[in-house]
Image: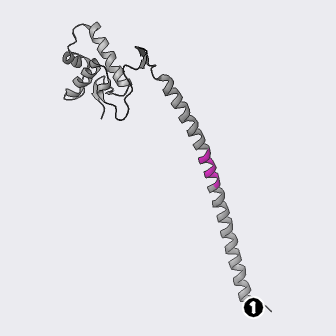
Amino acid sequence: MLDPELLERVTARRAELDELEEQLAKQLAEVRAERDELAVAERVLERMTGQLAEERASARPTPGQVGGRTVMLIPHREPGAEEDTLPWDYQRIIAAVRQAAGPVMAREVGEVVGVDVSVKAKLEPLRSKLVRLVDRGWLRKLPDGRFTTRL
């Protein structure tokens, strides 16, 4: 005959283990669901990264032809790229921005590089060059319209 006290302990332990098994099964289901969500998120991220890369590639200006060679007059700034890869007038613009004590307006850059700032028609091409340098990553434009070098 079985000892009733031992039988009671075995039954209690079996109930504890059944409860633990139920909790672990629930946790395992939650972990699997989260893993599936992460896999979906990863696929979406890969697809979006590819789409962004395509958009950026199509948004970049196409290089021109000079002497039969493909060149981009104002290249995108890349790690290790030096300012001497830019045309001379753009190098002067960056130097003028760099020499300033802080962010500068296009008019102030024009005064340094020798543009007649009293004539708006002569200042706008300079502003266009400044914006082009911002678009290509060489300069930074602040919300108030002033320009500064990238850090």
**Disc 1 crowd, CA 10 A, few/some/many (<14, 14-19, 20+):** few
Counting the numbered discs, the total is 1
Residue at the far bottom in the pictured view:
1
Q: Is residue 34 magenta?
A: yes
Determine the image quadrant of residue 108: top left
Q: Viewer-proximal residue, 82 or 150?
A: 82
Determine the image quadrant of residue 7: bottom right
Q: Which residue is mark 1?
A: 3
Residue 68 position within the rendered picture, expressed as x and y whole percent measured from the top left: 43, 15
Q: Main secondary structure of the magenta part?
A: helix
Q: Residue at x 71, y 82 (%)?
A: 10
* Colouring of the image: one colour
Against 90, residue 121 (above or below) is above
Q: Residue at x 51, y 31 (%)?
A: 53
**Which amino acid type corresponds to the residue marked 1 in the rendered image?**
Asp
Q: Viewer-proximal residue, 26 or 57?
A: 57
Residue 124 position within the rendered picture, expressed as x and y whole percent measured from the top left: 31, 12
Is 82 on the left-hand or right-hand side of 108? Answer: right
Q: Is residue 22 magenta?
A: no
Residue 24 position within the rendered picture, expressed as x and y whole percent measured from the top left: 65, 64
Is 49 on the left-hand or right-hand side of 147? Answer: right
- Secondary structure beneath dot 1 equals loop
Determine the image quadrant of residue 1: bottom right
Q: Viewer-proximal residue, 74 or 109?
A: 74
Residue 141 in view, yes or no: no
Residue 39 position within the rendered picture, expressed as x and y whole percent measured from the top left: 61, 46
What are the residue bounds of the magenta stretch? Answer: 32-39
Residue 93 in view, yes or no: yes
Instruction: Please identify the quadrant where the C terminus is shown.
Output: top left
